[in-house]
Image: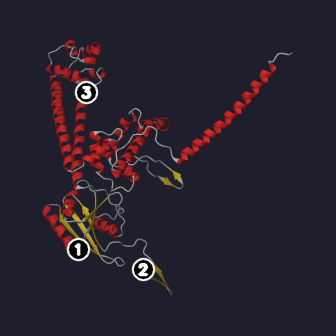
Amino acid sequence: MQRVDVGPFQQEVKAMIPAVLERCAGIDVHKRFVTVCVLIGAAHLNPEPKVKRYGTCNADLRQLRDWLKQENCWQVAMESTGPYWKPVFNVLEEAGFKVILANPQQVKNLRGHKTDMKDCRWLAHLLRHGMIRPSYIPSRAIRELRDLTRRRKQLIRNGAMERNRVQKVLEEANIKIGSVLSDVFGASGQDMLLALVQGQATAQEIAQLAKRQARKKIPALEAALEGHCMSESQRQLIRQCMSHLAFLDKQVEEINGQIQDKIGAFGFQESYELLQSITGIKREAAATVLAEVGDTVAAFPSSSKLSSWAGVCPGNNESGGKRKSTRTTKGNPYLRDVLLECAWAASRTKSSQMQRLYQRLERRLGHKRAIVAVAHALVEAIYFVLSQRRRFVDIVEPPHSVVRIKRLVRHHTRRLHKLDRWLEQLTEGSEGSTMQSQPLT
């Protein structure tokens, strides 16, 4: 509380946003150096700022750690600037500091006021007044598992790029087997690619390499291969792409084994099996969800918060009493992608709750929005199994709520009343027709 002099009168005013910390620090992170501001002072007084600059090598970061200890400042805030915040976080985490990671969009300084000194002081000011919403930082074990799952996704994406390159080279060489075979990289397609690369077989001989169901397409394959003009340089390109694909497949298999070893070593097996009980989520998807969310959901107060963090719930955009676009937020891209893939699988699982939800919403919302709604339902199921430590039980017809039961009772009651009136009219009509059809005596 402070007293303001306004002429002959004095008025007591209360600060709008009181300080909650007496000692805190803000760190502006860059690639080669960091700028640190420490604010020290009582909550009802203006703090005393101390600003220093350090390098990002380990020795410099240890000096930063020692200086914060000397100032008895154990609360630190910094922006999540690419990967550059992680070395600072590693050093401070080992020393027992409470590090708050801020979203850069939420702590951005005003235009024209952006310098390194002002940025670190602004972060410290926001932390002192409790105005920073901390980002989710999982445990070290989860972070190690997350590195593996994200690396696997990158390798799979690189494999898809190589397959597209092979398809492009085949099109340039006037080879249209991609229009005939459902999978050019299946058993039949790989044998044909090998024969094309060797460059000795005719179109008829290459078409005869088809196996099983593809043998029904031999005439179409001969037409797709007839008269092709594959050059030696194109053969070399396909040979390089196929060898790279084989290497990527081997890398993915190795990472899958490492992921399973990490899950067992860190004691995540129970959560891993609980996630696989959800419709549409199997081994690889369960490992990705486990790596992104964690083995518990203690960091998220409710399933709605988790859904918002994953980016599978409608956004808020209302102004002047008008509700504008409610498109979903970006969220965690890795978790969002795997949830949408699982939603596709769950919507096609016969006699499942997720399929019933998709079919009910698809007629009204369309395919894409219905898939996002199924992904939102999967997030609720994930939150349930990880918080309650119970397996997910798929109920095709979930139990009705009290409100829905009362609404159904009212609906069927009205229907029965209408049927009663129809029955009365039919009965009266049948009696009149019977009276008229009796013979005269």
Q: Where's residue 353, x and y in %?
A: 42, 38
The colouring scheme, among rainbow, by chain, secondary structure or one colour, is secondary structure
Q: State the separation of the CA atoms marked 2 and 1.
A: 27 Å
User: Of discs 3 and 2, which sits in the foreground?
Assistant: 2
Residue that carries the numbered disc 2 in the rendered image: 1
| Amino acid of disc 1 | Asn
- Name the residue: 22% across, 44% down: 151
Question: Which of the marked residues, 2 or 1, is nearer the chain's N terminus?
Answer: 2
Image vertical order of residue 221 relative to residue 100, above or below: above
Please tell me which of labels 3 and 2 falls first in the chain: 2
Q: Along the horizontal axis of the image, is 422 left or right of 338? A: right
Q: Quadrant of the N terminus?
A: bottom left
Q: Residues within 10 Å of mark 2 (few under 14, many from 20)?
A: few
| 226 over 275 or under it: above or below | above
Type of amino acid at the residue the image marks with label 3? Gln
The percent position of residue 127, horizontal first and vertical second, equals 32, 67
Q: Label 1 crowding class (10 Å Cα cut-off): few <14, some 14-19, many 20+?
A: few
